[in-house]
């Protein structure tokens, strides 16, 4: 992955901690992990992001699903320590008719059972589009989760541009106001990564369908403002656009051009 990233001009990347739709994880290869760590150092990579599987739902009404989420994330975080000081991103979950408050409580409960003082990984809650009963489409909900976590120093946020737009935040026309709101509700110091995607759907649609950069409803101008915003300048940006590798290479080249090579990009 590290070399693929470099080959398309990236200096960070995101990978699934295990099969995105299943639960199986390959046994950890310590040698591979050590190689990646030295490669990233050589190439001055910014932090990389492991993404938890989509099937993980810490706030399901079904207890066995919650237990599975806890066991999976605990195992993932133990593995993450072989590549220290990186990021682990997960979808807060869907409360499946239990109500958002119950959902928030269960997500925090799982984090309290897993996070520990010694870990070097920062766990990121991803901002969600609000599809179905998804928790985390409002900044206030993410804030409430963080407030209920004891080791909240280990928790941050990953802002997905498609998701926040679909959730109703107007990053197309009012980026600074949205960032102000984020800062007031959560604190910009908690923001650790950006998923840079255009959206197939209009603001507030709660759909979560990613589009190529500049080909969606957010549009090139707004995405350009995002990658050039001085308030986001030290964050890793990962593309999750519907592309093949050459399409990603083109998007990264174009985006880097806009902000004169200052930012970290990956896929
Ligand atoms: Fe995600
Ligand atoms: Fe995302
Ligand atoms: Zn998405």
Image: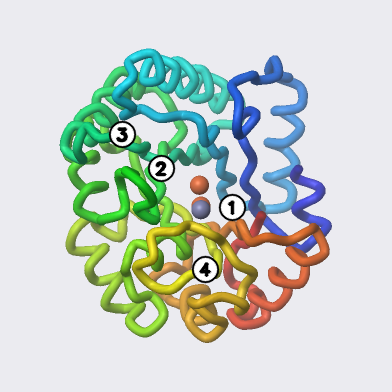
In what element is the residue under mark 1? Answer: loop
* Badge nearest the viewer, 1 or 2: 2
In what element is the residue under mark 4? Answer: strand
Q: Are marks 4 and 2 in contact (CB under 8 Å)?
A: no
Residue ID for mark 1: 46
In what element is the residue under mark 3? Answer: loop
- The Cα–Cα distance between marks 3 and 4, rounded to whole angstroms, is 25 Å
Residue at 43%, 68% (x, y): give it.
232
In this view of the protein, which residue sits in the foreground, 147 or 264? 147
- Of mark 3 and mark 4, the one earlier in the sequence is 3
Q: Are marks 3 and 4 in contact (CB under 8 Å)?
A: no
Note whether 125 is above or below 241 in the view shown: above
Q: Are marks 1 and 2 in contact (CB under 8 Å)?
A: no
* Badge nearest the viewer, 3 or 4: 3
- Of mark 1 and mark 3, the one earlier in the sequence is 1
Residue at 24%, 57% (x, y): give it.
187
């Amino acid at each position: 992955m590290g070399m693929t990233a470099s080959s398309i001009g990236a200096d960070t990347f995101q990978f699934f901690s295990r099969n995105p739709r299943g639960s199986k994880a390959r046994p950890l290869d310590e040698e591979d992990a050590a190689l990646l760590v030295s490669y990233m150092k050589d190439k001055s990579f910014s932090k990389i992001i492991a993404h938890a599987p989509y099937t993980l739902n810490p706030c399901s009404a079904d207890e066995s699903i919650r237990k599975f989420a806890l066991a999976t994330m605990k195992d993932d975080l133990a593995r993450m320590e072989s590549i220290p000081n990186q990021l682990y991103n997960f979808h807060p979950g869907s409360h499946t008719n239990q109500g958002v408050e119950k959902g928030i409580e269960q997500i925090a409960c799982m984090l309290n059972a897993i996070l520990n003082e010694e870990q070097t990984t920062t766990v990121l809650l991803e901002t969600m589009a609000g599809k179905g009963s998804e928790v985390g489409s409002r900044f206030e909900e993410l804030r409430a989760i963080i407030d209920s976590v004891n080791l909240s120093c280990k928790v941050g946020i990953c802002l997905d541009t498609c998701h926040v737009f679909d959730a109703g935040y107007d990053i197309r026309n009012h980026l600074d106001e949205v960032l102000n709101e984020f800062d007031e509700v959560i604190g910009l110091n908690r923001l650790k990564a950006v998923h840079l995607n255009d959206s197939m759907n209009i603001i507030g649609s709660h759909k979560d369908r990613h589009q190529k950069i500049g080909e969606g409803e957010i549009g090139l101008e707004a995405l350009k403002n995002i990658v050039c915003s001085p308030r986001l300048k030290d964050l890793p940006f990962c593309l999750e656009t519907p592309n093949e590798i050459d399409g990603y290479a083109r998007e990264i080249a174009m985006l880097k051009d806009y902000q004169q090579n200052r930012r970290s990009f990956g896929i």
